[in-house]
Image: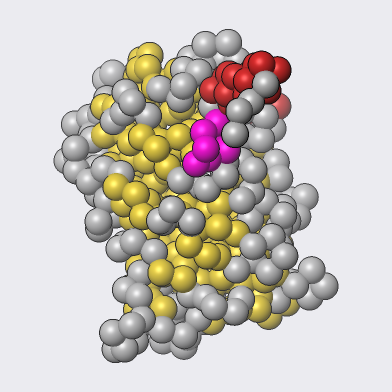
């Protein structure tokens, strides 16, 4: 078939527009950039996320150095222009930070590439997690151990003395992404504000939600694990609520909890308990208290074991829980999986979604949803992969991507994040 001159011009114009928009015959353009941390080589894997298929394509300059040791948490600043990587460091303890503990700042290029800017230090020892407030103005870094004050140095650089953890707060500059320390105006020593806020013992994860900041503390106090609630006030200040530390009650008599994650969305908060393989559901209020939802505790789905993380989707209708192993002896049952539940809007009870649990890579650690709410991805520690799934917006069911759901990331993949378009 011959095309007229006008037809050939039209096709050429379309091809030019497609290239300009990043479109190809096999995909629908890039909707975001994914960054996956890997502990084996202290690297950051980078991918473009395809709109049409959810497929991941490596950014040509990736992987990147984490500029520290043992990266564990990653945060994208609102607007997508800056990324913060939390390096836990190696050899850290209650006596001091380990080698390579740092907060590494990166700028994001128009093609999703990362450029290292500089590093910062949190005030505590053994970094575990980080969160930003809803405006993207303040970064809160969680450390397992809070330091003690040393008179001879006039600084908080002594060994931990009470077993509690610490939150270090920073202001993130809107133009450069650079961090400035926010000191605790409520607590002073020798007339100086302390450079951190204390939380419960051995915290492992935090969650900023609805003007509140919660930390999950794994140490046992009177036989119970706890959550520390703070309200986020003016200037990034954290105010300890009148509620005090919140006790997590045992669901199985005689079995201590092993809470592995805290996460939520909207007015919901969920904790995963690996000891009893259950999910604790809460509602959050203006005082940052946690009130048990109707039904309170929900058993994880049959055959699953060792829940490690949870995620509420952007609509607040579905809850997904990653499971690192299984109790089933049936060979067709996946070793690692994602359980899926609907959240009943009337009574807040969790109902299993048909077809779940869904197979993912080995040892999932984190889970994220893409900016257009079409796809979810897990980072898998044991095999260093990312698993992608399509979300059915009507049912919450997950299905495989059309071009394959497994993508090689980097050794010992920890957490991941997705940045949308760069503003």
Q: For the point 40% across and 22% down, which residue is it?
A: 113
Q: Residue at x 32, y 34 (%)?
A: 44
Left or right, residue 209 beside residue 99: right
Q: Residue furthest top?
A: 175
Residue at coordinates 52% horizontally, 37% vertically from top-left?
25
Image side of residue 98 versus residue 61, left or right: left
On the picture, is 419 further left or further right than 92? Answer: right
For residue 302, say whether it is visible. Answer: yes
Q: Horizontal placement of 399 versus 162: left or right?
A: right
Which corner quadrant of the image does residue 35 belong to? top left
Examine the residues drawn in magenta and state their main secondary structure: loop
The correct choice, above or below, for 105 with respect to 148 in the image is above
Question: Is residue 30 magenta-colored?
Answer: yes
**Which stretch is magenta?**
23-31
Q: Where is 210 relative to 184, above or below?
A: below
For the residue pair 99 and 316, the one nearer the viewer reads as: 316
Q: Does 179 lie within the magenta span?
A: no
**Residue 271 appears in view:** no
Quadrant in which the C terminus appears: top right
Image: 12 above or below 66: above
Residue 182 position within the rendered picture, expressed as x and y whole percent measured from the top left: 53, 22
């Amino acid at each position: 078939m011959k095309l007229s001159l006008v037809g050939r011009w039209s096709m050429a114009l379309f091809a030019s527009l497609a290239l300009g928009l990043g479109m190809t015959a096999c995909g629908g353009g890039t909707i975001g950039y994914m960054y996956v941390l890997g502990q084996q080589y202290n690297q950051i894997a980078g991918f473009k996320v395809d709109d049409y298929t959810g497929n991941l394509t490596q950014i040509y300059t990736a992987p990147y150095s984490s500029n520290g040791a043992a990266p564990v948490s990653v945060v994208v600043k609102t607007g997508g222009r800056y990324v913060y990587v939390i390096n836990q460091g190696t050899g850290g303890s209650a006596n001091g930070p380990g080698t390579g503990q740092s907060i590494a700042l990166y700028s994001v290029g128009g093609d999703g590439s990362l450029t290292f800017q500089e590093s910062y230090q949190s005030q505590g020892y053994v970094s575990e997690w980080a969160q930003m407030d809803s405006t993207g103005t303040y970064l809160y870094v969680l450390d397992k151990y809070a330091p003690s004050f040393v008179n001879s140095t006039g600084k908080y650089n002594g060994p931990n003395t009470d077993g509690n953890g610490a939150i270090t707060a920073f202001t993130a500059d809107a133009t450069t992404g650079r961090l400035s320390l926010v000191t605790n105006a409520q607590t002073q020593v020798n007339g100086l504000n302390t450079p951190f806020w204390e939380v419960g013992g051995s915290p492992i994860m935090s969650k900023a939600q609805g003007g509140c900041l919660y930390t999950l503390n794994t140490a046992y106090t009177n036989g119970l694990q706890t959550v520390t609630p703070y309200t986020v006030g003016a200037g990034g200040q954290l105010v300890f609520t009148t509620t005090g530390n919140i006790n997590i009650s045992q669901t199985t008599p005689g079995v201590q909890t092993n809470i592995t994650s805290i996460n939520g969305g909207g007015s919901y908060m969920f904790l995963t308990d690996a000891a009893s393989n259950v999910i604790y559901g809460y509602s959050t209020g203006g005082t940052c208290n946690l009130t048990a939802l109707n039904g309170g505790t929900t058993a994880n789905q049959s055959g699953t074991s060792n829940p490690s993380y949870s995620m509420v989707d952007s609509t607040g209708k579905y809850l997904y829980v990653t499971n690192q192993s299984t109790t089933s002896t049936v060979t067709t049952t996946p070793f690692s999986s994602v359980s899926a539940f609907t959240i009943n809007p009337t009574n807040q009870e969790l109902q299993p979604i048909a077809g779940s649990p869904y197979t993912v890579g080995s040892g999932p650690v984190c889970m994220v949803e893409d900016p257009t709410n079409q796809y979810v991805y897990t980072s898998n520690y044991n095999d260093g992969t990312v698993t992608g799934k399509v979300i059915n917006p009507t049912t919450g069911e997950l299905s495989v991507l059309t071009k394959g759901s497994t993508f090689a990331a980097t050794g010992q993949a920890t957490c991941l994040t997705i940045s949308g378009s760069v503003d």
